[in-house]
Image (spheres, rainbow, N blue to C red):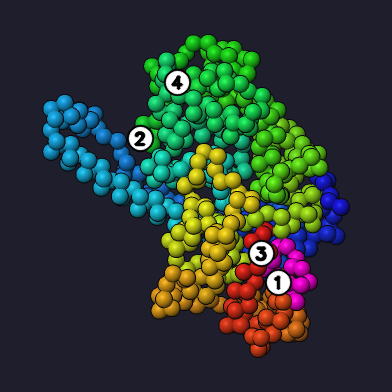
């Protein structure tokens, strides 16, 4: 029977399997040695170690690594010259300007590819996995896409915003997202002004970011919220409030009347009970169980407890996550192996868990795109649907090929002589298997399944795997271990975490 309690997991139930579950959900998995270290800490210290990641050194982030001026706006003088050329019908001057614009487009697209690789490398190498896991969560929650924004540096800025508020205060993050150039551009608020308010940002703030679709607001509330957000715009890389474009007259939002601006609008909707319930529902699906309809009626008491804690803590996220990661419900058997790995989770966890080389980052990003998750390019403002939408006949084939590529260096679209056969030291994994078998070769196949799969394989599948391993003709070392892993990662269970 499923345990829905928020009470802490009993110390006697804390073991390597529980530690592995925590590190996979609160991060991207880890090596057997890392799992053992987390196990030795005990649950409370392990949870705090992941949550209080500021104590762990992180790779420096230098904003100067990327060119913020690729999309630098035209100067007043340059805009005047372009306008004069249009009025005079000077096609040569306009063509010169367009050629410059096209050159900037190409440079910016290349920089976006470099930023994609930069973040993927950070996901793989970070010693602060929860920080990057929450950065990924916010990227899907406050979804904006490069193809609409067409400014790579603004996407980089937004990624930094999500990281700096990874486990911080949700209300503060909402206020800052209303000042974020990428969001303002993506939802057209830079074009919103008194008398002609654009409703996109107000609508998505209510429907997708704070309250949840249909939760206690009307179309009139959206229209009034849009009026409150007029004047919220940006110049180059910085937020700017344009008072001449702001509608300073009285507005009524969710029954409250006043000369509201964007901050007031955010404050009003954040005060609603629906906010905590909506956000905690998303956190539940992201960290606990993303099966269809979750959290369902049976999980209502657990989800409600999270929402109550979020309200009590005035939207501070860390106490809520601590409640989740220590709870009996989080570690319940029904929630282990219940979540389908996102493409990013699949890529990063395979590398971090097995210790394979990352191979070529551009190839991994291309594979992520084929599997339905291209970083910085969510499909729409709703972000990625996740769950079962990650798996279909096409993406499953790519998922299998991705694992084989990471394990062997062989790409399905390349000849063998193009293979990235970077040496992979399988010794740590071999030692982990040996530690679980006491030298009994007949137990190696089961030990490998236990190390790699989040969901226990059925006895039928275990028997099939044992028989396949026997044909390899020896202990699971080097080439035989590589072959066995190619079989394991092809199992449906490998897609779960």
Q: Residue at x 19, y 31 (%)?
A: 82
Q: Is residue 370 visible?
A: yes
Q: Which mark is residue 236?
A: 2
- Residue range highlighted in magenta: 451-463
Q: What percent of the width, then of the height, locates residue 33?
A: 67, 69
Which of marks 4 and 2 precedes in the sequence? 4
Which of marks 1 and 3 precedes in the sequence? 1
Which of marks 4 and 3 precedes in the sequence? 4
Left/right of residue 149 with respect to residue 26 in the rendered view? left
- Is 442 placed above or below 323 here? below
Say what secondary structure mark 4 lies in: loop
- Is 222 placed above or below 22 here? above
Q: Nearer the viewer, mark 3 or mark 4?
A: 3
Q: Which mark is residue 449?
A: 1
Q: Is residue 39 visible?
A: no
Q: Nearer the viewer, mark 1 or mark 2?
A: 1
Structural distance between the alpha carbons of marks 2 and 4: 22 Å
Left/right of residue 105 with respect to residue 296 in the rendered view? left
Structural distance between the alpha carbons of marks 4 and 1: 57 Å
The residue labelled by disc 3 is 492
The residue labelled by disc 4 is 197
Q: Nearer the viewer, mark 2 or mark 4?
A: 4
Structural distance between the alpha carbons of marks 1 and 2: 52 Å
> For mark 1, does the 10 Å Cα neighbourhood hold few (<14), some (14 to 19), or many (20 or more) residues?
many
Q: Residue at x 50, y 45 (%)?
A: 379
């Amino acid at each position: 029977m499923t345990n829905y309690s928020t009470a802490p997991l009993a110390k006697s139930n804390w073991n390597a399997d529980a530690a592995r579950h925590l590190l996979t959900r609160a991060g991207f998995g880890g090596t057997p040695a890392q799992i053992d270290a987390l196990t030795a800490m005990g649950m409370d210290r392990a949870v705090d170690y992941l949550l209080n990641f500021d104590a762990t050194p992180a790779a420096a982030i230098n904003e100067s690594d990327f060119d913020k001026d690729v999309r630098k706006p035209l100067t007043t003088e340059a805009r005047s010259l372009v306008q004069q050329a249009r009025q005079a019908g000077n096609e040569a001057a306009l063509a010169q300007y367009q050629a410059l614009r096209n050159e900037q487009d190409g440079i910016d697209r290349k920089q976006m590819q470099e930023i994609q690789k930069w973040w993927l490398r950070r996901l793989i190498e970070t010693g602060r996995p929860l920080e990057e896991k929450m950065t990924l969560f916010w990227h899907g929650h406050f979804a904006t896409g490069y193809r609409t924004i067409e400014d790579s540096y603004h996407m980089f800025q937004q990624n930094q915003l999500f990281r700096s508020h990874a486990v911080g205060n949700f209300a503060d993050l909402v206020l800052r997202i209303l000042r974020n150039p990428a969001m303002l551009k993506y939802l057209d608020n830079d074009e919103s002004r008194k008398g002609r308010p654009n409703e996109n940002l107000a609508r998505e703030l209510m429907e997708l970011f704070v309250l949840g679709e249909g939760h206690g607001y009307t179309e009139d509330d959206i229209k009034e919220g849009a009026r409150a957000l007029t004047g919220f715009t940006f110049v180059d890389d910085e937020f700017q409030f344009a008072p001449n474009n702001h509608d300073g007259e009285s507005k009524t939002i969710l029954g409250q009347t006043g000369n509201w601006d964007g901050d007031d609008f955010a404050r009003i909707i954040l005060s609603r009970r629906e906010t905590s319930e909506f956000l905690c529902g998303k956190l539940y699906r992201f960290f606990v169980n993303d099966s269809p309809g979750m959290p369902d009626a049976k999980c209502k008491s657990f989800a409600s407890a999270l929402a109550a804690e979020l309200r009590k803590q005035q939207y501070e996220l860390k106490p809520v996550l601590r409640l989740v990661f220590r709870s009996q419900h989080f570690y319940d058997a029904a929630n282990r192996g219940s979540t389908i790995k996102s493409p990013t989770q699949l890529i990063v966890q395979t590398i971090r868990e097995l210790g394979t080389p990352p191979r070529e980052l551009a190839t991994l990003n291309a594979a992520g795109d084929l599997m339905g998750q291209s970083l910085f390019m969510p499909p729409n403002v709703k972000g990625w649907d996740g769950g079962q939408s990650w798996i279909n006949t096409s993406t499953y084939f790519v998922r299998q090929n991705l694992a084989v590529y990471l394990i062997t260096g062989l790409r399905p679209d390349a000849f063998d002589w193009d293979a990235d056969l970077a040496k992979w030291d399988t010794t740590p994994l071999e030692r982990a298997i040996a530690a679980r078998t006491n030298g009994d070769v007949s137990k190696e196949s089961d030990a490998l399944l236990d190390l790699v799969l989040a969901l226990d394989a059925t006895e039928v599948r275990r028997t099939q795997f044992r028989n396949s391993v026997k044909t390899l003709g020896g202990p699971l070392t080097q080439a035989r271990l590589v072959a066995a892993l190619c079989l394991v990662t092809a199992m449906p269970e490998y897609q779960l975490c």
